[in-house]
Amino acid sequence: FPVTILNVLKNEDPDIVALQETHKNETEDLVESISKALGFDFYKHDSTSQSHIDSKFNLGHAIISRYPIDNHTFDLFHNPKLSVVWEDGRTAQSFDKGFSTVAVNINGQALHVTTTHLVPFKKFGVDATSDVGQKILNDVQEKIKIMQDPWIICGDFNLNSKSLKDYFPKLLVNMNELDINEPTTPEGSYYDHIIFKGIRLIESRVLNSVLTDHYPVIAIFEL
């Protein structure tokens, strides 16, 4: 059970939580456990592939909400079936990645929220400007349809950049980006991003004191 993350969530007291690399099987659901611990009744948890961390579980992503969730969609991205040989001789292959979108009903107003996780480009030696990289990025833009205002997209994009505009020009039309001015991983990468529209950003920060492989990114918005 992720005590560190749970403690952060309890201290921050968020209304909506977007998670990636979550675990679930027939008897255990990490997201359900977190939701219950927070006292939240609403969550959607989608599995994408078998976990490379613990083969007894499926890996996925999820959205947890204090408010009711009216709609939910889920889809997988194109998997180029990449492979890489580690220094110890093991071969790793790219897992399926995808995204989930929900409509959170906040006092009668619908806020669309998307959580996503992309293939690790660097780990598999893929340049985002290459044919393989462009096919992945174009598939993301084709499948994540532009939603009506307001809309928030959160995720581990696995692109080491402070901005996503050069990678997703179609997706970011009329959308704003969170200013990520400090790394979102202990290794110094800028992988995690939030983009949004139809909603006003009040403040944001990266919690770089949390001992996890990715730092939580906190954003406060006003409808």
Image (cartoon, helix red, strand yellow):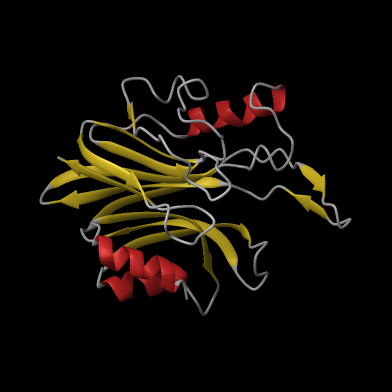
Q: Residue at x 45, y 22 (%)?
A: 165
Residue furthest to the left in view is: 107
Give the answer, above or below, for where 149 lies relative to 192: above
Residue 22 locus on image (x, y percent): 50, 62
- Quadrant the C terminus occupies: top left
Residue 89 locus on image (x, y percent): 89, 55
Q: From the viewer's perspective, is 55 left or right of 108?
A: right
Q: From the viewer's perspective, is 173 left or right of 39?
A: right
Q: Between residues 190 and 142, which one lies in front from this camera angle? A: 190
Q: How many marks?
A: 0
Q: Residue at x 41, y 65 (%)?
A: 5
Q: Residue at x 32, y 64 (%)?
A: 9
Q: From the viewer's perspective, is 6 left or right of 49?
A: left
Residue 138 locus on image (x, y percent): 56, 26
Give the answer, above or below, for where 56 lies relative to 179: below
Q: Residue at x 38, y 44 (%)?
A: 114
Q: Quadrant of residue 69?
A: bottom left
Q: Quadrant of residue 128?
A: top right
Residue furthest to the bottom in view is: 27
Residue furthest to the front in view is: 209
Residue 39 locus on image (x, y percent): 25, 73
